[in-house]
């Protein structure tokens, strides 16, 4: 059996978070697993979310495998581009049915995009590196957004024939 499989997961990490802390490490040391409980009852958006989770996990795998910042940056860029396309598609659908919570939902997308924009700028200038903390933020935001915010549009879209 390979040495790294025997050791606990955290100690086999080549890539260390910038603010290593056992509790945080414990909490974030796992991939994001999409399952049916994340379904928003709209096929295309479930597929988008699965793709976002896949790219996010690629970032996680890249970090734990010790890949360089350039490689990680490319994955993060893909994640952000995909997220922007997905947000736009959700907003078009919600606008189409005059979804009552459209504005709040759009605000959530904008806040995330703005925050990620700041992070990307800091990465570009070398102020920060891609860390497990960043993964934890992205993963936590996505989970919450799908489960709490996106899930709300399911019944409204379904009622207008979008499923
Ligand atoms: Fe979404
Ligand atoms: Fe959304």
Image (tube, grey):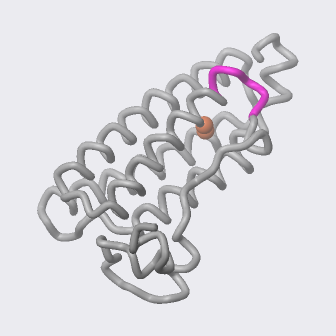
Instruction: Give the left or right position of residue 43, taking residue 91 as reference.
Output: right
Regarding ligand 2, which quadrant of the image does it lie in?
Answer: top right
- Left or right: residue 95 compared with residue 38: left
Q: Is residue 87 above or below residue 44?
A: below
The x and y percentages for residue 113 are 41, 46
Q: Residue furthest bottom?
A: 22
Residue drawn at the location 75% of the way across and 36% of the way down: 39
Residue 67 picture location, percent across and down: 24, 57
Task: Locate the C terminus by quadrant.
Answer: top right
Coordinates of residue 14 in the picture (x, y in percent): 30, 72
Residue in the foreground of this view, choosing between 61 and 77 = 61
| Residue found farthest to the left | 125
Q: Nearer the viewer, residue 151 or 65?
A: 65
Residue drawn at (30%, 59%) of the image? 119
Residue 17: give x, y in percent of width and height.
Answer: 35, 76
Vertical relation: 143 (above or below) 128: above
Please name whichever residue, 6 or 111, is drawn nearer the observer in this view of the structure. Answer: 6
Q: What are the residue bounds of the magenta stretch? A: 40-45
Q: Looking at the rendering, which quadrant does residue 43 occupy? A: top right
Can you tell which quarter of the image residue 49 is in? top right
The vertical placement of 35 against 70, above or below, is above
- Residue at the (74%, 50%) spot, across then down: 148
């Amino acid at each position: 059996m390979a040495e790294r499989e025997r050791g606990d997961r955290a100690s086999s990490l080549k890539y260390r978070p910038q603010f290593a802390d056992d509790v945080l490490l414990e909490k974030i040391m796992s991939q994001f697993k999409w399952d049916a409980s994340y379904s928003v009852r709209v096929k295309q958006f479930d597929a988008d979310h699965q793709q976002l989770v896949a790219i996010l996990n690629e970032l996680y795998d890249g970090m734990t495998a010790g890949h360089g910042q350039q490689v990680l940056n490319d994955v993060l860029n893909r994640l952000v581009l995909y997220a922007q396309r997905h947000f736009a598609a959700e907003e078009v659908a919600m606008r189409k049915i005059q979804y009552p919570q459209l504005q709040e939902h759009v605000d959530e997308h904008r806040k995330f995009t703005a925050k990620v924009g700041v992070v990307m700028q800091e990465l570009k200038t070398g102020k920060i590196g891609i860390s497990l903390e960043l993964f934890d933020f992205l993963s936590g935001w996505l989970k919450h957004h799908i489960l709490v915010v996106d899930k709300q549009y399911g019944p409204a879209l379904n009622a207008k024939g979008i499923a």
